[in-house]
Image (tube, grey):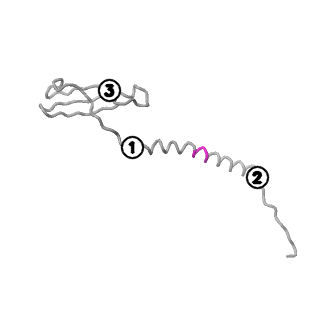
Amino acid sequence: MDDQSFESPQVPGRRTFFKRFVNGLGAAIGAILGVPLAGLYALPAFSTPTRQWKECGAVDDFPVGDIKLVPLTPLEQRQWPEAWGAEAAWVYRKSDQDFVVLGLSI
């Protein structure tokens, strides 16, 4: 080892620093926003909706062979504006004992 030449470590330039800084900042923002958004879309898959019966009127209010639109009140308050919480059902009475009910949520 006659010649000992030590190279000094290269200091990254300004462009390299800003590239790494911006990439790190983008990754941090992505992580901060990504975790809550992932929870927003993933958590409803793990919860089971509760099913409840709604009162839509007396049997005599629905004549046989007739279709009637019945407005319903929501069982729970939604987080969106109330204008989006309207619910209704189309009720068709086929015979004295048979009903067909089609739900509508707006």
In the rendered image, which residue does mark 2 sit on? 13
Relative to 10, does residue 83 appear above or below in the rendering? Answer: above
Residue 82 screen position, x and y as percent: 40, 26
**Mark 1 crowdedness (10 Å alpha carbons): few <14, some 14-19, many ≥20:** few
Range of magenta residues: 27-31
Number of labels in the image equals 3
Residue at the image point whose x is 36% and y is 43% from the top:
48
Q: Earlier in the sequence, mark 3 or mark 2?
A: 2
The three-letter amino acid code for the residue at tag 2 is Gly
Q: Comparing marks 3 and 2, which lies closer to the viewer?
A: 3
Mark 1, secondary structure of its residue: loop
Q: CA distance from mark 1 to mark 2?
A: 51 Å
The three-letter amino acid code for the residue at tag 3 is Thr
Q: Earlier in the sequence, mark 1 or mark 2?
A: 2
Quadrant assignment for the N terminus: bottom right
Residue at the image point whose x is 78% and y is 58% from the top:
10
In the rendered image, which residue does mark 3 sit on? 73
Q: Comparing marks 1 and 2, which lies closer to the viewer?
A: 1
Residue 24 screen position, x and y as percent: 65, 48
Relative to 51, does residue 62 appear above or below in the rendering? Answer: above
Residue at the image point whose x is 50% and y is 42% from the top:
37
In the rendered image, which residue does mark 1 sit on? 47
Mark 2, secondary structure of its residue: loop
